[in-house]
Amino acid sequence: MGGAGGGSRAPGPPAAPLPALFSVQCDPDLRILSRGRVLLGGSPLRLLTLSQAGAAVFGALAAGATVAEAGAGAGALARRLVSAGHADPVPPASDVPGTPGPDDVTLVIPARDRAEELSRLLTMVTGSCREVIVVDDGSTDATAAVARLAGARVIRHVSPLGPAAARMAGARAATTGLVAFLDSDVLPGAGWLTRLLPHLVDPVVALVAPRVASSAGRALRARYEMSRSPLDLGPRSGPVRAGSRISYVPAAALLIRRELADFDPAMRYGEDVDLVWRLTAAGWSVRYEAATVVLHQPRSSWLGWATQRVGYGSSAAPLALRHPVPLRPARGAALGVAAAALAVRGPAALTVGSAGSVGLGAVLSAVRLRRKLIELRPPVPHAGPLAAVLVAQGRRFTAWAAADTARRVWLVPLGLAAGRPGRRVLLAAAVLPTAWDWWRDRPDVGLVPYVVLRVTDDAAYCAGVWWGCLRARTTLPLRPAPTGAGRVRPGRAGGARISSVL
């Protein structure tokens, strides 16, 4: 790869257990069954069965022992737990010998016409790493002068080449093994690198990113952004991979091994998602560390806010051409939208019959899943009730995904061309899930403004998706993914048997 910046596939990482000084912290949603011999959790949902010896090692790890203290095979098992999303790695303290420090990092800041924001950022990061490089991407203001005045090294593009090209120019000029990227409109706290650097002790970790939270404000737009910013991935750390709870991390703030920094300059939006998915496809680990927070300034106008959302949506087509499966609607979600539209169009008897078919399908799925759980060694206790709960959760996820697909992919066509029945589906998809999110999260925005802004947010994204498809001449982001695409297959590692459950 070597920082070519052409979107090439990353070389794979070394096969390695979790390092000896690491410990793990179990995910809050992990279910521990059969006295520690069956573990259920992660995203997507995965089930691990352990031998008696493996259960003993897991018990030691769950109690806080380091890999070195937990016994034979602990490194391989800890790696599997972390990879499955059953546990988060806890790296050693930043002052432990062998842990990279600020002198191992070059900070790269791409900027275009951001002199005021850049001045504020440079005041906060000066002295935090070996060198700061500002890539002036064709600015017409005093961006370059501000950077030089603060002591940063400046690389200037005569004309704008885009954020990906700017990041690549900075990465190529770096002389350290690690490169941190910060956008000019973020504000990191003191010691923001402290929690990120120890993750790079793990030779399998390519990239680690902090939480990018929206800066506080009393305006309606700022309050909405604090609860629904596309850059804020929430308060829970975890592994990053396509199709999981955390499917990407934004390039607004991240730390990466320099040789793996390979943003594709051809992409104006989505270049960070593309990089993450190429790295994880090659076997690298990408981590999201929510304990470190940097603040991002939201757009200063409603037009800028909507334009940003359209831009994000427009990345779906080029991303789908590079990664055919992750951005396509799940087949179950797409069928859910179609079934709902048919149900509201048909007579009441059809609606009742559809509901009965859904119920029967859920029962049959629970029966099949119960049989699989019983056949495991050791068998899963209370397999019947557990299967029913898991199937119900899966159906709820599919319904929510169908609503998300209706809003973010088919909102504009449903609203314009589907007639009254389609609009009923659209209304349900817009109001019910968003109202539930408002009730769960309790943002500092009233229910009605929140729902209106969410629908507007999704409409702008949807418009971007369709515009991107027209420009790239592809319908991939609009078509359901093939059945079974991306399915996790059973396997063994570290004394554990792992398989996907749903």
Image: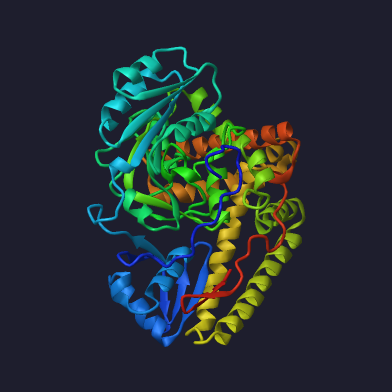
* 341 vs 260, nearest the viewer: 260
- Residue pictured at 38% horizontal, 40% vertical: 176
Q: Classify the position of the N terminus by image quarter.
A: top right
**Image coords of residue 79 (percent x, y):** 43, 67
The chosen color scheme is: rainbow
Residue 59 in view (yes/no): yes
* Side of 379 where 415 appears, left or right: right
- The relative height of residue 57 versus residue 407 in the rendered view (above or below) is below
**Image coords of residue 161 (percent x, y):** 56, 24
* 50 vs 257, nearest the viewer: 257
Q: Residue furthest left?
A: 95
Q: How many marks?
A: 0
Would you identify the image quadrant in which residue 150 lies? top left
* 201 vs 330, nearest the viewer: 201
* Side of 450 where 404 appears, left or right: right
**Image coords of residue 416 (percent x, y):** 71, 35
- Residue pictured at 48% horizontal, 33% vertical: 167
Would you identify the image quadrant in which residue 424 lies? top right
Residue 216 in view (yes/no): no
Q: Classify the position of the C terminus by image quarter.
A: bottom right
* 361 vs 292, nearest the viewer: 292
* Side of 178 where 169 appears, left or right: right
**Image coords of residue 258 (percent x, y):** 45, 43
Q: Residue furthest front?
A: 175
- The relative height of residue 47 versus residue 91 in the rendered view (above or below) is below
- Residue pictured at 32% horizontal, 46% vertical: 292
* Side of 465 where 384 appears, left or right: left
- Residue pictured at 70% horizontal, 41% vertical: 414
